[in-house]
Amino acid sequence: MTTALHSLQVQREDTILKILAEGEWIGADTVPADVAGWQQRGWIFGVEAEGQRYFARYQFDDRDQPLPVIREILAELGPATDPWTIAAWFHFPNGWIVEEGCTAPIAPKDALDRHVAVVDAARRFRGTFGA
């Protein structure tokens, strides 16, 4: 493995660890039975770590049903071969989403109540390079 490739792999692993540590994740065994169907239909996304499937808590409402905005965001992001790219998009601050009266970007997961802004940010992201 080249030094550059190894460096990218280490950076990816560090990013995954950061996303897992800083987020609220629930295991496949603690989510509703419909979760596999929801994921297959593109209503939610899941990631795999240490042989287990996990789902970001922010995708669900207080009744453990998928938030409709997640489906719209996933549709705008388009098909992704790597669910960690999706997780990173939700987790890290996004320059297309800012607090009102402020210039600092916020993470899409923290702006899900701003429907138009997060869906537009997903639309803008599609087709760009994301890690």
Image (spheres, rainbow, N blue to C red):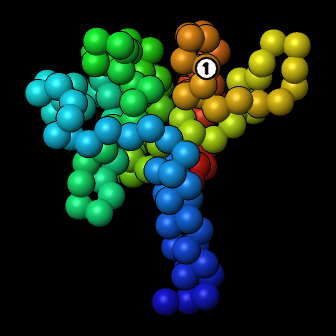
Left or right: 69 as drawn, with respect to 64? right
Residue 51 sits in quarter:
bottom left
Which residue is pictured at 47% across the width and 32% down the height? 77
Residue 40 appears in the figure: no
Q: Please provide percent x and percent y for residue 61.
A: 37, 14
Q: Please provide percent x and percent y for residue 44.
A: 32, 28
The relative height of residue 44 versus residue 62 in the rendered view (above or below) is: below
Residue of label 1: 111
Which residue is pictured at 56% across the width and 65% down the height? 14
Q: Indicate the amino acid at tag 1.
A: Ala
Which residue is pictured at 60% across the width and 49% down the height? 129
Residue 120 sits in quarter:
top right
The relative height of residue 62 versus residue 123 in the rendered view (above or below) is: above
Q: Please provide percent x and percent y for residue 26.
A: 32, 38
Residue at the extreme left: 33
SS for callout 1: loop
Q: Residues within 10 Å of mark 1 (few under 14, many from 20)?
A: some
Q: Please provide percent x and percent y for residue 94.
A: 69, 34
Circle count: 1
Residue 116 appears in the figure: yes
The relative height of residue 107 versus residue 72 in the rendered view (above or below) is: below
Left or right: 106 as drawn, with respect to 122? right
- Quarter of the picture holding the C terminus: bottom right
Residue 89 sits in quarter:
top right
